[in-house]
Image: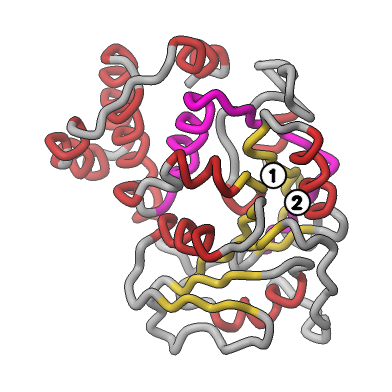
Amino acid sequence: MIQFDRTAVPLPPETTDVTVVVATRNRRDRLRETLPRHAAPVVLVDNGSDDGGPDDVPGIQIVRLGENRGAAARTVGVERAATKYVAFADDDSWWEPNSLARAAALLDAYPRTALISARVLVGPQRREDPISAAMAAAPLGVRDGAPGPAILGFLACAVVVRRDAYLRAGGFHPVLHVYGEEALLAMDLAAAGHRLAYVPSLTVRHMPLPAGRDTGLRRRREVRNRVLTALLRRPPAVVRRTVAAAWREDRTGTVEALRMLPRILRQRRPLPQDVERDLRTIGC
């Protein structure tokens, strides 16, 4: 059982340039433990919780949607934010002290960079998330105008973004809902000419529950969204390869994606050659 310090008191803001946006659903108890750890203004977006929703907390702006919009709920929070930068957090994660202020300073210093990803430490043991290790390998190198290795993927709970760049890119695509929604946004930001960088000196703590999520649903959604993302942005050869691999992994998720084909093809926008080349470099 993961234990939290329930005596934690709200932290004073370490920066006024960043708003933390948290999307949540049916996790009111966890929010009581994690919300005090955010050292910046917070916009909390409730995705139609049926457990009564989050408690009203002084100083925290709560948006109650009345429905579950998945990852697109974060965009509602970004629209409500009054700062030039936005950090995302889940209801079971938070940014370690000084990380938000440092992220804001880096984005000030590197105006071509639209997204910075932090190192993620999981659980009380502070195990490094494998995605962080993959980013640190830096297969794309460090680009001009970026404070760290170039990336084309991220964990949503561990990034700080430029608010205007995020909104111009359309945010998290509503059709993907949740699970694997980050890949499309990373592609769209890169296609718009922005830098995305990994900065391991920034740290996010992630304390997931040991159980309670539907792993079967998650697998189906991840497979579905992988196919949808390929249909929306990747060349035909990659789409065929992605569909074939998805079919072998989870036929139900693949069929769900293919049923949406007419709607998705109307939104198809192939990536620039340089972004597609970078995706091939990292094996996507």
Look at the image and tell me in which quarter the N terminus lies: bottom right
Residue 134 can be seen in this image: no
Going from N to C along the chain, the mark reached first, 2 or 1, is 2
Residue located beneath label 1 in the image = 129
Residue located beneath label 2 in the image = 121
| Residue 68 in the image, given as x and y percentages of width and height | 35, 68
Which of the 4 image quadrants contains residue 242?
top left
Residue at x 67% of width, y 17% of height:
139
Residue 162 sits above or below residue 271 on the image: below
Circle 2 Cα neighbour tier, 10 Å, few/some/many (<14 / 14–19 / ≥20) = some
Mark 1: which amino acid? Asp
Relative to residue 105, is residue 178 drawn left or right? left
Q: Nearer the viewer, residue 81 or 278?
A: 81
On whether residue 194 falls in the magenta region, the answer is: yes
Q: Nearer the viewer, residue 132 or 98?
A: 98
Query: Dots 2 and 1: beta carbons under 8 Å?
Result: yes
Q: Which residues are magenta?
A: 178-207
Q: CA distance from mark 2 to mark 1?
A: 6 Å
